[in-house]
Image (cartoon, rainbow, N blue to C red):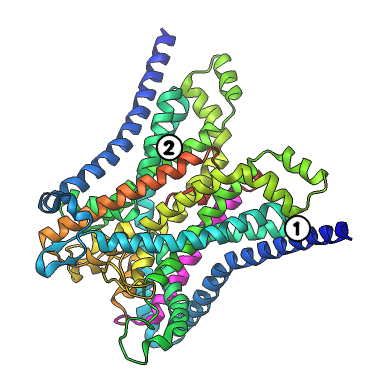
Amino acid sequence: MRQVSARGWNGLFAGVLAACVLVVIGAGILALATLIVASAPSIREFGISFLWIPAWNPLHRQYGALPFLYGSFLTAGIAVLLAGVIGVTTAVALTQIGVRWLRSVLSLLLEVLAVIPSVVYGVWALLVIVPIIARLTDHQAGGSVGAFTGSGFGMLAGGVVLGVMVMPTVVAVTREAIASAPKDIAEAAMALGATRQETVALAVMPFVRKGILGSLYLGLARAFGEAVAVSLVIGNQPRSGGGLLGRASTLASMLAHTLSGTVPPLQTAALYELGLVLFLIAAVFYGLGRSYIAREAISLGFLPW
Amino acid sequence: MTRVSYKTGRKLKNALFVSILSLMTSLAVLPLLSLLWSIGVQGVAALVGLFGAPLSRGAASAVLASALVQSLITAAASVAIAMPLGVAAAIYSSQYAGLRAGRTIRFIMDILSGLPSILSGMVVFVLLSGVSSMLAGVLALVLYMLPVVVRMADQVLVAVPVAYIEGSLALGASRIQTIFAVVLPTAGKNLVTALLFVVARMVGETAPLLVILDGGATFQGKAGFQPLPLRLYSALAQGGSVSHQIVYAEALILLAIIVAVYGLARWVGRSDR
């Protein structure tokens, strides 16, 4: 009698927990469905050509994703290039060279970098990065007020901020990959008289290639999804083409920038379609990144934002 | 002769390697130091300026206090909804679901947590048909946090040794008793750390709130609900219309809160390092 009721309670408990799982999954599906429904007018109007219409011109009811894809891929590319080069070498340094206390201090600092909110990165970028770029590129403006180059705002500033925001992800994931590489081979290399550099090149790196690739994909996903800091420094101008110093927009920065204010229905639908495109790209990169990473750790670097 | 030069070559290469690594590591830390320095200096100067002058003191403290309180209420409400739901789902996926079901749930949570934060705000905006309120902000944060909470909690709960669970069940404890007496206490510290990490990230999150509060709402409407990150963003995005002093002060306060929560998380999980 008592056993039966205990089993009943257990079943009920399991059922409630399973319901929680379904609620979370259901919320996700609802979110995706909402995005699709909200962008339906735009999908109907433009079809698949939405992806390569090269202009975003509300006056002519012309809406295309190309300028934002251009901005997103370029800024994310800059970000992952910066974060990849600096982040991977830093991860190697934090595991292979230096004294232990310094390593742990530096790791802690890099984790703090992951916890700083994007709006604070925006403040910092406005205070530091934009003025630096402005000073470096000032001569190109030829002194004309309001010229696009020389202001410091633009694709490069956006890419650099993103690079800093993505770096903790790259460092954390690469470190994790190095930590799970077989130790005995590296030790054998050291025992045979290999230098640090030779050990890393021959006995460590071959085991962490996948991890590095995974970290770069996760970084790309995060760079694509970041809206707030980028929209503050990129200049918010949807253009396909235009150089690194030109003002631009990314998918996410456009959403942050434009949805503040009343916009006509078709433009809203087109904005939601931008959101849908953003979700698909971010999900693909995120999934790719995850597929390369075997081990996991409770680390901020693994958080997807 | 050739032997010696080969050996020095290797040593040189190694020295070059070590110096490049050191250089790159300094480059990696530089942004953080720059950020802390610039916002620290400007923020402290702003706080001194605002609270030093008797005229601005009242207004500044009123603005900051209301933004802080709204931030805390928003954060507390979304944590209160997302944490129990997320941890419950994680208990299911780690303790009840079979191997394949668990893997499927994890995969779905992975994909869902890839949802860029700005989209959760857009979704809630449509679902509530444009009603701009604190509830909308909370729901957006919850939508965006939930899969992450599940994933982080699941990761911690899966790490509890199976032998503990089997031992408990073998002694005749029920599933529920095992979960509350063995699984959760064992995972406790790590679980709290993981959840605090999520809280630290969430307190400063701006994007989910942004669309709800700005989209369609009038300025009067928005003025009613402005947590700290949102105030910061709208002041910066409008540019110049708001006094810069308060922006820096707010950035510093936000940074301080978040680093404090992060420090707490590290402190709770300290002995595991």
Choose between A278 and A213: the one closer to the eye: A213
Establish if B147 lies above or below B25. above
Magenta stretch: dominant secondary structure: helix
Task: Work out how far the residue at label 2 is from the one at label 1, CA to CA, in angstroms.
Answer: 39 Å
Element assignment for label 2: helix
Q: Amino acid at mark 2?
A: Val
Is residue B131 visible to the viewer in this orientation of the structure?
no
Which label sits on residue A99? 1
Chain that bears disc 1 = A
Which label sits on residue A177? none
Q: In the picture, which quadrant includes the N terminus of chain B?
A: bottom right
Choose between B230 and B74: the one closer to the eye: B230
Residue drawn at (21%, 53%) of the image: A273
- Residue A47, how many percent across, how many down? 15, 50
Instruction: Report the residue marked by disc 2.
Output: B87
Report which quarter residue B64 is drawn in: bottom left
Are there few (<14), some (14-19), or many (20+) residues within 10 Å of tag 2?
many
Residue drawn at (42%, 76%) of the image: A126
